[in-house]
Image (cartoon, rainbow, N blue to C red):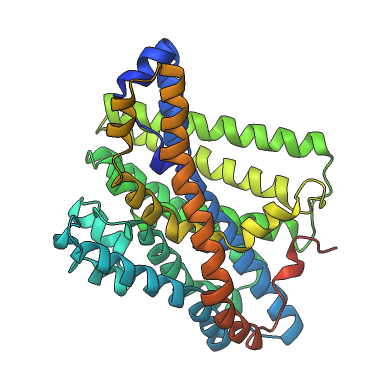
C-alpha cells in the first residue's frame, strides 16, 4: 500500500519519457500495489478463523466476549490515536478543515461506507483507516459463525460470501460505479475474507510443507494474478465503465486478486527463519503501525518543497530521478518505520500486554505449528 500511495499512477511526463512504451506496465504495477490491502484482509480472516477454531477445539466453545476485548485492545487505541492525529492535521494551517467532521464516520467504523456512498476520498492522512472499518464489520459476525457452525457449514458460508461479493460486483459494474467506490465497498472486500477462511479450512490446522521452488512459484503466480487484476481494473475503468462486459472484467479482476492473496499467504506459511529473517518478522510485528502511519509520513513529506529545490539545482536527469525517488519515497518510508517502531514500543505494547491476559489460544505458534 505504501508504494501504491507514493508511485505515480498515470500522466507523469518524466516516467513516460523514460519508459516510453513500458510506462503502462509501470502504472499497472503501481495500481497492483493496492492489493497489499487485500492481502491484509485475507491474512486477517485466516488468522482469526484459525485461532477461533483452535479455541473451540481446546475449550469446547468460543468466548465471544473475550474475542471482542482482544480485538478492542489491539485495534482501538492506535486507531483512535490516528483519528485524533487526522483531526489535528485537518485543523492545522494548510490542512483540509472540511474533512474534520467527516472523520466522525470513521469514529463509528463507517469510513468505508462514507466513501462508497458519497464517492469521496478524504484529503486527510487518516483516510486509509477506512479499511479498519471493513475489518471491524467482519468481526461483527466472525466469532458467532465459528462458534455455532461446523466446518461443513463454514465452507458453505464462505461460498455464500463470495457469491454475494460477486453479485455486488456485477451490479456495481453494470451501473458504472467508479473504481474507488467499488474498492471502498465492504461487501466487495468480503471476498478476501472468504478466501482467507477457505484456506484455513483447507489446511485444517496443518502448515504446508513446501520446497523453496514451490514457494517461489506461488509468489510468482501471485504477482502475475495481481498484475492481471490491476490491468483488468484499469482497462475496465477506461473502456467499459458500465454494462455486462465491465461487470465480468470486475468479477475476474477481484477473483484473481483474491486468489493471488491466498497463493502468497500459502507460500509464506511455515517458512523457515532463513526465508523470513528477523527484520522481516519485526516488520510483521509492527505492520499495523506501518499501515496507520504511512499516509501521515507521505502527507508530511509532500508539504516539503522537494521538487522546487531539485528543479532549482538544475541536475541532470539521472541524478534528479535518483534524488527525487530517494526523497519522495525513501524519506516517508523512513519516517513510517520510525513512527511505527516507536508506537509499538511505547504506545501499543501496554495494550498488547493487557490483550494477552484475555487470550485463550496463543496467536504466535500459527506460523510454525505442526
* Residue lying at 47% horizontally and 36% vertically, measured from the top left: 326
Position in image of residue 18 (x %, y %): 41, 14
Nearer to the camera, 293 or 267 = 293
Total labels: the figure holds 0
* Residue lying at 43% horizontally and 54% vertically, measured from the top left: 294
Left or right of residue 51, residue 188 in this image? left
Quarter of the rendering containing residue 362: bottom right
Quarter of the rendering containing residue 80: bottom left
Position in image of residue 56 (x %, y %): 69, 80
* Residue lying at 56% horizontally and 55% vertically, measured from the top left: 42
Left or right of residue 13, residue 137 in this image? right
Relative height, residue 75 to residue 241 (above, below): below
Relative height, residue 83 to residue 247 (above, below): below
For the question of whether residue 252 can be seen, the reply is: no
* Residue lying at 78% horizontally and 45% vertically, measured from the top left: 275
Kindly give the residue lying farthest to the left in the view shown.
98
Kindly give the residue lying farthest to the front in the view shown.
313
Position in image of residue 6 (x %, y %): 40, 40
Nearer to the camera, 314 or 46 = 314
- Locate the C terminus by quadrant: bottom right
Position in image of residue 289 (x %, y %): 50, 63
Left or right of residue 296, residue 358 in this image? right
For the question of whether residue 306 can be seen, the reply is: yes
Amino acid at each position: 500500500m505504501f508504494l501504491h500511495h507514493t508511485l505515480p499512477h498515470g500522466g507523469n511526463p518524466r516516467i513516460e519519457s523514460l519508459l516510453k512504451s513500458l510506462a503502462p506496465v509501470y502504472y499497472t504495477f503501481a495500481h497492483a500495489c493496492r492489493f497489499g490491502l487485500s492481502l491484509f484482509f485475507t491474512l486477517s480472516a485466516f488468522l482469526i478463523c484459525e485461532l477461533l477454531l483452535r479455541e473451540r477445539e481446546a475449550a469446547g466453545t468460543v468466548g465471544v466476549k473475550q474475542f471482542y476485548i482482544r480485538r478492542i485492545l489491539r485495534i482501538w487505541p492506535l486507531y483512535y490515536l490516528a483519528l485524533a492525529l487526522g483531526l489535528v492535521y485537518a485543523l492545522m494551517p494548510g490542512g483540509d478543515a472540511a474533512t474534520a467532521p467527516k472523520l466522525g464516520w470513521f469514529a463509528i467504523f463507517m469510513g468505508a461506507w462514507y466513501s462508497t456512498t458519497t464517492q469521496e476520498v478524504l484529503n486527510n492522512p487518516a483516510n486509509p483507516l477506512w479499511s479498519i472499518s471493513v475489518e471491524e464489520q467482519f468481526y461483527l459476525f466472525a466469532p458467532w459463525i465459528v462458534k455455532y457452525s461446523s466446518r461443513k457449514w463454514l465452507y458453505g458460508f464462505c461460498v455464500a460470501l463470495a457469491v454475494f461479493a460477486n453479485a455486488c460486483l456485477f451490479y456495481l459494474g453494470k451501473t458504472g460505479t467508479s473504481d474507488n467506490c467499488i474498492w471502498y465497498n465492504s461487501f466487495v472486500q468480503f471476498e478476501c475474507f472468504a478466501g482467507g477462511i477457505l484456506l484455513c479450512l483447507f489446511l485444517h490446522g496443518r502448515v504446508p510443507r513446501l520446497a523453496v521452488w514451490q514457494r517461489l512459484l506461488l509468489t510468482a503466480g501471485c504477482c502475475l494474478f495481481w498484475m492481471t487484476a490491476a490491468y483488468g481494473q484499469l482497462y475496465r475503468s477506461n473502456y467499459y465503465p458500465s454494462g455486462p462486459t465491465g461487470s465480468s472484467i470486475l468479477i475476474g479482476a477481484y477473483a484473481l486478486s483474491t486468489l493471488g492473496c491466498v497463493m502468497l499467504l500459502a507460500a509464506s506459511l511455515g517458512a523457515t527463519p532463513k526465508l523470513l529473517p528477523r527484520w522481516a518478522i519485526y516488520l510483521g510485528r509492527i505492520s499495523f503501525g506501518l499501515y496507520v502511519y504511512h499516509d501521515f509520513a507521505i502527507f508530511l513529506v509532500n508539504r516539503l518543497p522537494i521538487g522546487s529545490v531539485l528543479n532549482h539545482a538544475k541536475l541532470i536527469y539521472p541524478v534528479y530521478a535518483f534524488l527525487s525517488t530517494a526523497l519522495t519515497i525513501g524519506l516517508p518510508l523512513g519516517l513510517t518505520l520510525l513512527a511505527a517502531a516507536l508506537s509499538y514500543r511505547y504506545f501499543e505494547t501496554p495494550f498488547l500486554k493487557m490483550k494477552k491476559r484475555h487470550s485463550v489460544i496463543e496467536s504466535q505458534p500459527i506460523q510454525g505449528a505442526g
